[in-house]
Image: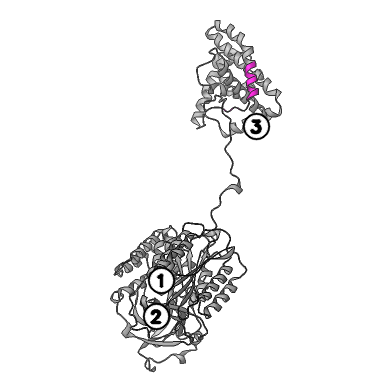
Amino acid sequence: MTMSDDFEKLGRLTPPKASAEARARALTAAMQAFDERQENSTATQGSVQPVRQSSIFNRIWSPIMNRKLLAGSALATLLVVPAAAFLTLELTRNGAPFGESAQEIALKDEAKKEMQRQRPEPQMVAKKAATDELARQREAKTLEAPASAAVESEAAAPAADAMANGVARDSAAPLSAVGGMQPQMTYQPAPIAQEESLIAPPENRERFGKADSNPVKSVLTEPVSTFSVDVDTASYAFVRRSLMEGQMPERDAVRVEEMVNYFPYDWPRPETAAEPFKATVTVTPTPWNGGTRLMHVAIKGYDVVPAQAPKANLVFLIDVSGSMDEPDKLPLLKSAFRLLVERLKPEDTVSIVTYAGNAGTVLEPTAVKDKAKILAAIDTLQPGGSTAGAEGIDAAYALAEKAFVKGGVNRVMLATDGDFNVGPSSDEDLKRLIEDKRKSGIFLSVLGFGRGNYNDALMQTIAQNGNGTAAYIDTLAEAQKTLVEEAGSSLFPIAKDVKLQVEFNPAAIAEYRLIGYETRALKREDFNNDKVDAGDIGSGHSVTAIYEVTPTGSPAVLNDDLRYAEAQKPAADASPHGGELAFLKIRYKKPDGDKSELITTPVTEANAVPALAEAPNDVRFSVAVAAFGQKLSGASALADYSYDSVIDLATAAKGADPFGYRSEFVNLVRLAKGLNGSRN
């Protein structure tokens, strides 16, 4: 038999497959035994080639040799060397790692467990494997230098015993990257993350009221629109924070009227306090629909001079529950109230009530002239506990009654993230309590903080029932705007229960749609009912409402004519008010009054401008904000009106911008455009 024949047989030979358990024991014992021999032997033995070849040899061919398929050790050496080279080449070509594979680690772990169960067996296996290995090396050395064989034979028995004992002592020693043993290290498998130990993302428990956008209404069937004014600004601040954090706001969080009313406008104002506010109406073309027009209604309140402002009795009702323990909640809240205290007059009074599980009075009514005491009380506030908001409101109203100022401003200022999750009262109970206290002359305003569990729906309800405002404080700059720059409009009302009603002339207007104010809609009969609550207007406040109207005969009319209503269609020249487009009515009460008063304004073509570019900057900018708010809320009417068009309209109408609010708005539109991923 020639050497080539042996190689051919070897190439065609398929080794018998050993059981996984036996394979693991043999592999581990042989590898560790040889490595221990390398560490302990004082004589240089074996090849200088990397140990990995020995590892492959033992793993593949040891079963064959044990079954005596090859009789001679010398012949085995000649056959194994090229076979090992061939296998190494195949492993390299197929991308197999030279370190331990996952399967090898698993097999060694299984072998380790088996050795622990049967301790005598590893010694026997290790000794046998060590003897075989030394015999192979001895025979290989004989081919190269016969004189060294005697030395190897004399050292074989004690070396095998030592190696076997070493395996028994440390059968779990790990292998290095090249197959060597690391006696001083213990193999630790990578920890497997348990499902319960994974950190779940924080739950988003923010709650917003749901309200469908106002529909297009036919003037023939529903000619009158009635709603309560809204001077809140919380929605804009919340939308801004969402966009600045790189996410589009929830549609329910967008209230278009609050976005429009966020900005200061220089509408014409009343001359004296006897006229609490003045209405200005402007009719313009619609930038997103060539077949409709916009009827822009602007109201400006009388601005009370600070020296004439009534005395204020304020109670800070502060949520210090555990949910407020975040930088944008209680720490920001404390800074905001410090700003407000600096704005108050020395004769004003401040009280502080906190609630977290149980309500507590931190500061009895204290004059602002003792400012240091008030600021020190604010600084002591610390978060902790669950929220029992109803108890806190009870305590706050008790302090407000204790320091009540007749003819002055008596107001509870609730500062919270809106998490009224514990407490004896339901939402309806809270609303009834606030309504009762409102009738006694104590109003309530809300300042919202933070993200994650902000209950916007409840905060809006509380503010509306408390004759107060709702603001969202996301930055110290927003606190400065709300509590310092606009303190007069936030704290000092000049009119309460303000309602607007518009009657459209069917001879001139076929359809209309009120933009925003979905949560402020009133019934037609509520307008003259003084028992129905509505919004308030503070000192210097401005309120803006925009209708999109469709002229009679316009191709943009959406509703078909009624088949059986031909007789109801008015003749163009039959009405004594034929030149009017609409009739605006405003009803309000004085802050300490119970009987409403009425202001009326007819709307004619004299209020119209032929092009939007000819309208004042404030009108055009407010229209841009209304367009942006509608796009964020998903209004179908603006599906084809792009963000770029909003940017162009707002930029051209920016005008004087001393605080940078309008520039910030343009940047927000750009952010929304980028986040939306399209030009529209």
Where residue 410 sits: x, y (%)?
48, 76
- Residue at 61%, 33% (x, y): give it: 106
Q: Which residues are magenta?
A: 161-175
Mark 1 or 3, nearer chain start: 3
Closer to us: 385 or 210: 385
Question: From mark 2 to mark 1, how far is it between C-alphas?
Answer: 54 Å
Instruction: Kindly report the distance in space between the C-alpha atoms of the residues bearing marks 2 and 3.
Output: 81 Å
Q: What residue do we see at 52% from left, 19% from top?
A: 82
**Residue 26 within the segment the image draws in magenta:** no
Question: For numbered disc 1, what is the local secondary structure?
Answer: loop
Is 489 drawn above or below residue 108 in the view shown?
below
Q: Position of residue 523 (x, y in %)?
A: 51, 83
Q: Is residue 172 magenta?
A: yes
Inspect the image, locate mark 3, and give the three-letter code of the amino acid beneath it.
Answer: Glu
Q: Residue furthest front?
A: 370
Q: Position of residue 364 (x, y in %)?
A: 51, 69
Q: Which mark is nearer the camera, 1 or 3? A: 1
Which quarter of the figure has residue 643? Answer: bottom left
Q: Which mark is residue 110?
A: 3
